[in-house]
Every structure is written in C-alpha cells, then in structure tokens.
C-alpha cells in the first residue's frame, strides 16, 4: 500500500507523463475515469458515456503538451469530456452530418453542405497555423465562447480573439481563392 508521501499530485503525474512515464498516464486514468463516467452517465446512455471517457483520455494524450501546470487538471479533463459530450449530442454520433450542419457558413463564406464542401473545409482548416485551427475548432465546432476557449488553450481572451479573427480572414481568402480557381 502507498503511503501518503508517495501519492503524486495531478501536476506531478502530468509532468511524469510528459517525460515519458506511461504509468503516470495509467494513474491519471485510474484517478479520473470512474468519476468522469459517473458524471457522463447522467447525460448519456452507458455505452456512449464509456465512449466519451475513452475519447477524453485520447484527447488528453493528444493535447498533453497544452496542459498548463497549476491550472488544475481536474477542470481541464472535465472540460474535455463535457465538450466531447456536447459535440457528440449535437452531431448525432456522425461526424460528417455534424460538419454539414456546422459549416453551412464559415467566416462569412456560404456554400452548399455537400461532400465537396466538407472536404473544402477540412482542406482549408489544414492550411491554418495550429493555434488558429485549434481556436476555430473549439469556438466554431464545439460552440465554446471565447472565454472558455481561452481557458482551454491557456491564452488570454484577447489573444484567442485575434487568433480566431486571423483564422477566419485566412479561411475567407482560401475560399475566395478556391472559387476563382474553379
């Protein structure tokens, strides 16, 4: 049995995980999976709740270098989980139909929501810098207000708004260029 002196904080576990300690990730999973599952089961069927918990930890892994020590891992994980839950509820469990609904307008550019349009959006987003792409995805696809986007990405509110504005301007230019090329 572990003594209290050996119990690591969330920040210590994240630091260890970032340094390559996979056991630290396992400990974070053991620490948060069940409480997350309980919270999500109040909102989703059991199978969907299980899926969202798995997706949450996959997202945690993908965004692990974005974590800001001292900011609180628990709220960060719960934010990821509830954003995934809301996204899943909006998209009806089907990503393409979600994208079709959400991208009917993008940065002032309107086009029909068909397979080609979806591919155009994916292609255009891929051309943006990572910071702009992430802010736009959180604000546009996940529907988060800019203050929550700022908290999620660890930037100031004004920085997030600037990134979004620059991203939307760049998207508009990409779509205008694509329209001229057709």
Image (cartoon, rainbow, N blue to C red):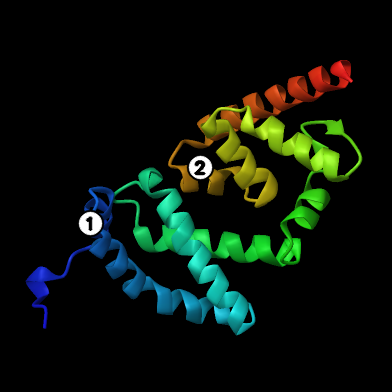
Whether residue 32 is situated above or below residue 132 in the rendered picture: below
Whether residue 14 is situated above or below residue 172 in the rendered picture: below
Percent x, y for residue 82?
Answer: 56, 64
* Residue 59 in view: yes
Q: What label sits on residue 128 in the rendered view?
A: none
Residue 93 quadrant: bottom right
At mark 1, the secondary structure is loop
Determine the residue positioned at 58% across, 27% down.
162
Q: Earlier in the sequence, mark 1 or mark 2?
A: 1
Give the residue pinned by disc 2: 150
Percent x, y for residue 57?
Answer: 44, 62
Percent x, y for residue 3?
Answer: 8, 77
Determine the residue positioned at 70% across, 29% down.
168
Left or right: residue 62 compared with residue 170: left
Give the residue pinned by disc 1: 21
At mark 2, the secondary structure is helix
Percent x, y for residue 17?
Answer: 27, 54
Determine the residue positioned at 46% across, 74% down.
36
Question: Which of pointers 1 and 2 indicates the residue nearer the eye?
Answer: 1
């Amino acid at each position: 049995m572990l003594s209290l002196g050996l119990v690591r904080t969330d920040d210590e576990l994240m630091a260890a995980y970032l340094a390559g300690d996979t056991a630290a990730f396992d400990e974070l999973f053991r620490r948060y999976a069940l409480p997350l599952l309980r919270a999500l089961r109040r909102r989703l069927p059991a199978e969907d709740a299980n899926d969202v918990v798995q997706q949450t930890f996959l997202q945690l892994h993908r965004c692990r270098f974005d974590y800001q020590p001292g900011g609180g891992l628990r709220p960060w994980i719960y934010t990821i989980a509830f954003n995934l839950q809301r996204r899943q509820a909006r998209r009806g469990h089907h990503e393409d139909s979600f994208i079709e609904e959400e991208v009917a307008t993008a940065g002032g550019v309107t086009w029909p929501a068909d397979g080609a349009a979806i591919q155009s959006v994916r292609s255009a987003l891929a051309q943006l810098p990572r910071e702009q792409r992430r802010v736009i995805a959180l604000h546009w696809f996940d529907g988060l207000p800019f203050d929550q986007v700022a908290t999620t990405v660890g930037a100031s509110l004004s920085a997030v708004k600037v990134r979004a504005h620059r991203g939307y301007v760049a998207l508009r230019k990409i779509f205008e260029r694509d329209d001229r090329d057709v």
